[in-house]
Amino acid sequence: MAARAPHGSNQPPKIIVKKIYIEAHGAHHGGAWKVAYADFVTAMMAFFLLLWILGATTEKQRRGIADYFSPTLVNMKENSAGSNGMFGGSSITDKDNYPHRASQTGTKSLTIPVGATGGANIGSGEKGSLKARLTAEDQRNFDEMKRKLEQAMKSPAFAKLASHVKFIQTRDGLRIDLVDDADYSMFALGTTQLVPEASNLIGMIAGSVKGMENPIMIRGHTDNLAYGNPLAMNNWMLSTGRAEATRRRLATGGLMEDRFYRIEGVADREPMIANNPADPRNRRVSITLLYRAGSFDDGGSTSIRTSPGGLSK
């Protein structure tokens, strides 16, 4: 580039050369770090997903996940139809652990009846079953027997004892409680000897239930008044002895030995007057007419056997 010469000078113009140097950068570094970062994020996501699964699933579901990725046991179809995938065919949100996949071999509407609730009566049905028929028949017999006993106790011979007899419907059958009070006791004080009036009453009960087939359970109760020497006599022995005395009186009234299902004494452990264990009304004998076999629940007393003497084992 030539500059203008100064005035009055014949010197040639100065030439100024401007050089621009452009430095060459290195080759492009690429996106390898991005791939590494993406792998790290993916690994962290998988880690947190694993933590969530461990906290949101049951042991059975976790076993199903492990078998899905590394199957070692053939137990994928043990519990429900179509359980041939992760979680055994069900999902984490399944409330009743029943699968709802398109590939399952059955549906809930096909395998579980509409309105089914389960419980002790499952499989019995409301009508036409042996259980329902026997229960209804037993209940009619209980009501008729109760009516006859209440009518008989209006006679002068039993009028004194009418207030001491209570009929209570339970889940096992009809219970007849013979209850003491402060003025009257069914047994001589501290013994297993029935007083004459109570003996006659139990004989009348025997005659009322003799024609029925229902098994009988007898339970003796006492108050909590203790004996001076519990090793010689105690409330356990007294309550059991009174239950056995009641059984013997029913037997002499015509009841066959195989009618007696369970004889037991519970001392003062089941008081009628819970806030006053010493109350004389806690002294009582309970005679329960049980529903016949096949009509009462399997839980509870159905597994109890009686010895030839009638005492429970």
Image (cartoon, rainbow, N blue to C red):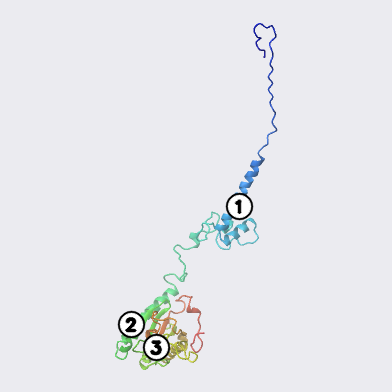
Which amino acid, by three-letter code, is at mark 3?
Ala
Which residue is labeled 2 in the image?
A: 147
Q: Nearer the viewer, residue 6 or 262?
A: 6
Q: Could you tell me how far apart the alpha carbons at marks 3 and 2 are, in whole angstroms?
A: 15 Å
Circles 3 and 2 in contact, beta carbons < 8 Å: no
Q: Which of the 4 quarters of the picture holds residue 117?
A: bottom left
Q: Nearer the viewer, residue 165 or 230?
A: 230
Q: Which of the 4 quarters of the picture holds residue 251?
A: bottom left
Query: Can residue 36 be spotted in the picture?
Result: yes
Q: Secondary structure at mark 3?
A: helix
Residue 281 lies, in percent from the top left, at 37, 84
Q: Secondary structure at mark 1?
A: helix
Which residue is labeled 1 in the image?
A: 47
Residue 280 lies, in percent from the top left, at 38, 86
The residue located at (31%, 85%) in the rendering is: 151
Q: Nearer the viewer, residue 295 or 46?
A: 46
Q: Could you tell me how far apart the alpha carbons at marks 1 and 3 are, in whole angstroms?
A: 75 Å
